[in-house]
């Protein structure tokens, strides 16, 4: 580990279409995903987080808010989808269009 003691950490991430924030927190024994969200301060910075049921993921896989975290986990606060991406892709394909890398259509 070298001269400095390394502290185990987790990240909490939230993104809107205009902004992304990632907060790094020290991992406390027994810390859950919901506790990490609360300690991150992101729910205060983005009030819309508290306006709906909390849906969380860790590296893209949905998890329960009570899931205990491990060092290096990144808790993602998920926003609701406006449309099912699979349905959107099929609809676009039927009209000869494809989704672009920026989420737009081509």
Image: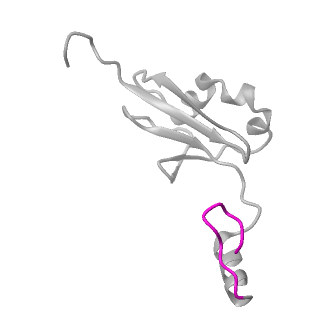
Please indicate whether residue 106 sits to the left or right of residue 1 in the image.
right
User: Residue 58: percent from the left, percent from the top?
Assistant: 48, 46
Q: Quadrant location of the N terminus?
A: top left
Q: Residue at x 64, y 75 (%)?
A: 86
Q: Residue at x 19, y 15 (%)?
A: 2
User: Residue 45: percent from the left, percent from the top?
Assistant: 73, 27
Task: State the count of labels.
Answer: 0
Q: Residue at x 69, y 77 (%)?
A: 87
Q: Nearer the viewer, residue 69 or 22?
A: 22
Write down the region rendered in magenta.
96-106
- Whether residue 100 is in magenta: the answer is yes
- Whether residue 77 is in magenta: the answer is no
Quadrant housing residue 20: top right
Query: Secondary structure of the magenta portion, mostly?
Result: loop
Residue 8, compared with residue 72, is above or below; it is above
Please indicate whether residue 41 sits to the left or right of residue 82 in the image.
left
Residue 21, compared with residue 16, is above or below; it is above
- Kindly give the residue lying farthest to the top in the view shown: 3
């Amino acid at each position: 580990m070298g001269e400095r003691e390394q502290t185990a950490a987790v990240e909490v991430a939230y993104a809107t279409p205009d902004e992304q924030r990632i907060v790094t927190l020290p991992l406390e024994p027994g810390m859950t995903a919901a506790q990490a969200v609360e300690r991150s301060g992101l729910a205060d910075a983005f009030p819309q987080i508290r306006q709906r049921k909390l849906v969380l993921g860790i590296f893209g896989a949905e998890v329960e808010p009570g899931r205990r975290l491990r060092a290096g986990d990144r808790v993602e606060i998920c926003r609701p989808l406006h449309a099912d991406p699979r349905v959107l892709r099929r609809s676009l394909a039927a009209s000869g269009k494809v989704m672009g890398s920026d989420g737009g259509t081509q």
